[in-house]
Image (tube, helix red, strand yellow):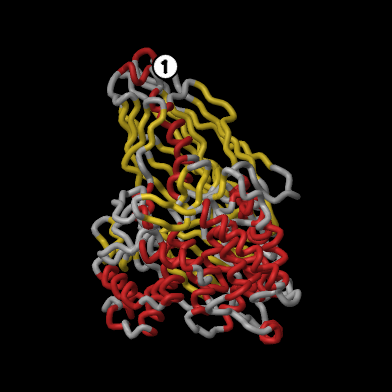
Amino acid sequence: MALSLQLLSNVGLADEKTHTYVGGEAKTKRVNSSGSGYSKSRTDCISAPTGRLFSQSSFKTKTKSKRNALIASCSLSFENYKEIVPGISQPGKACLETYVKVEGGLSNYGENAKHKCKMSYQLQMEDIGIAPAPSAPSGRDALAVVPLLPADIRMRREKESTISFGVPLTILNGKLEPMVTNGASLKDIRFTNYKEDSLTLTLQARASILDEVKCSPKIRLGMPASKFSDFGVQVLEVSPSCRAGGFLSNAANAPAEISKIILKEANISFVNKVFAGSDFDDWAEDDPELFKFLDKAWMQGRYCQWRGDPGLCLQISWSDNSAIEKRESRLLASVPKPEGSTNIDSARQRLEKLYEFAKEHQVYQEDGLEFPVGFRKGDIEDADMALFGGLLCRAGIDEGCKLVKDAQHSSGQFFRSPRRLGNDDTSSKATFSGDQLKGVIHYLTATADRHSLLRFLEYLGTQETRVIATGRTLESGYSSCPNRAPNFTCLLIGADWYMLERLAKLQGLDWALPSDIGDIKRRYDFDVSDLVWEALVTNNGYRLHLVANIAWSMKSLGIVDPSLEKTLRIILAREPENPFFNYLVLGSDARVQRLADLKCNADLERDKRYDWAWQRAERDEAWNDGMVWDCVFIYKLLIDDPLPVTTKTENINRAFSEL
């Protein structure tokens, strides 16, 4: 699941008024004849009223007044936390820390500095009404390992509705790249002051301005309890600790400038570089149904243990302990029903028309190569053709099978398309990916190409991969391309090995699997029922399409598990107008044909025919830019699926009643 963070504004409970507290004044000594500078700090604390807690994310500090300050800061700290929902806590005590420093020097003889801070905040009820645990949970708790980060996602639904995302600090440190703004630089940024379960995070860095003033700043951060859409980083304190290189730098107030830049970078660049992702507003627009569900949850960040090492954990938790169970039940109850028999003659006519057009206009024909492709105003779009070719092959379309077969190198490695065969990997551009692997698995399933499978398994055995930070292996496995850090996009995950092992056993090639396949399976802890989780919380679009492909491949490989049918039904309920998702549940049905007829009637002479419509959210209307092969694919399945999901309407209806 993709998570993104945003800068915190003054957020809190909508029905609460904003309170203000003014702290006492911090006043330094006067600069004496020796020219020494002085600093002063003070701390003022308040406690929440009985039965209330502070809404930490709502806190904002502001200077009330100051005089003669070289550096003046207002900082926050919190105590007496109490859990409000599982894993989410709010403080009962808040402290305002005021700091001021007067610049030394004979020009300031007799001067002192004063500073007064204030803070605004909101309150919430101590008891927010936690719903009881479900009496009859229908799904298991799960651990999903994301080796390419690496990260662990723990999902609980048996006694509570929570998702926790954990990542090692050593990986996050590597993502905090140098930051440069207006002549000031921030380098060597690292998490420090680790204390397990602490809700205060600390960054240490080196900073300078105009290569003259040197600082060793500390930035205290919080990721306080907030509703999902308000979650973000809260800067609690910035301590610049500057050493001036000369009088001119001090006169230019460089240490104060460093503080401003650190504050800005801690708020903005830290978030973007550590937790890159879609903006919440964009996500809400792309997948409003999932966003509405997630926005009922609370989120909070803290230091934690990650496999025995210091880590950072984000907790997502619902006050209703049965929230995930209810979401699943609601979706399963809304799955579209079959609409009757397919009009085979009509489907065949449309298939023939689309197929002829695709063969004439949507094929790459150069350098002795010939394979399906997308075009965007004349530009070739083939970066994902291993996936789309595999889908075509799975539907029984020979051009798709040939595409994937021709995309395999003599080394055994597969590439994104035959045209890209033998390309070199770079740190920012991989010649293959985990997404494309799903297409290869479709090809190997549909063709039973034992030789290609053997070559591929042998290639994987040469691509042992270790995710290393500070000299320690954090994760290990095998990659489907030479690309490694920083993205590890080719590192195989648990579901990939599950399917490859199944293919290998069906072909009598289990001896060609990596010798440590057992350790890999235990470490990734993949279970078919985990796909239900992914169907529930993966955002619409290509990621949800990949989950559907995994479930379809497993069914095509003869894996019988009620979780597969449940996964596909949940996906269909979330995108009920997607003809491919409908096919995966209903088989060759009039509903699938009706939706395909609606979406495959776009003007074929359009100048953009590059996308695979069924991998996009419905709101994108990607069929208007479809590569035509996507429509060939769906009509071929309607007429003659070589590995049918279901064959009779009564079987479909029985599946509905049983599940």
Which residue corresponds to the image point at 53% horizontal and 60% vertical from the top-left?
Answer: 543
| Residue hosting label 1 | 110
- Residues 373 and 81: in front is 373
Question: x, y percentage for residue 590?
Answer: 72, 72
- Examine the rendered structure and indicate whether residue 209 appears above or below residue 462: above
Residue 150's x, y, as percent? 38, 61
Q: Is residue 305 visible?
A: no
Nearest the viewer among 512 and 192 is 512
Quadrant placement of the C terminus: bottom right
Compared with 260, 630 (above or below) is: below
376 lies left or right of 594: left
Q: Is residue 576 visible?
A: yes
Residue found 26% across the figure and 64% down from its top: 410
- In x, y percent, where is residue 283? 61, 51
Q: In this view, does 110 lie above or below 228?
A: above
What percent of the width, then of the height, locates residue 74?
Answer: 52, 36
Q: Is 347 situated left or right of 362 in this image?
A: right
Q: Could you tell me how many numbered marks the image carries? A: 1
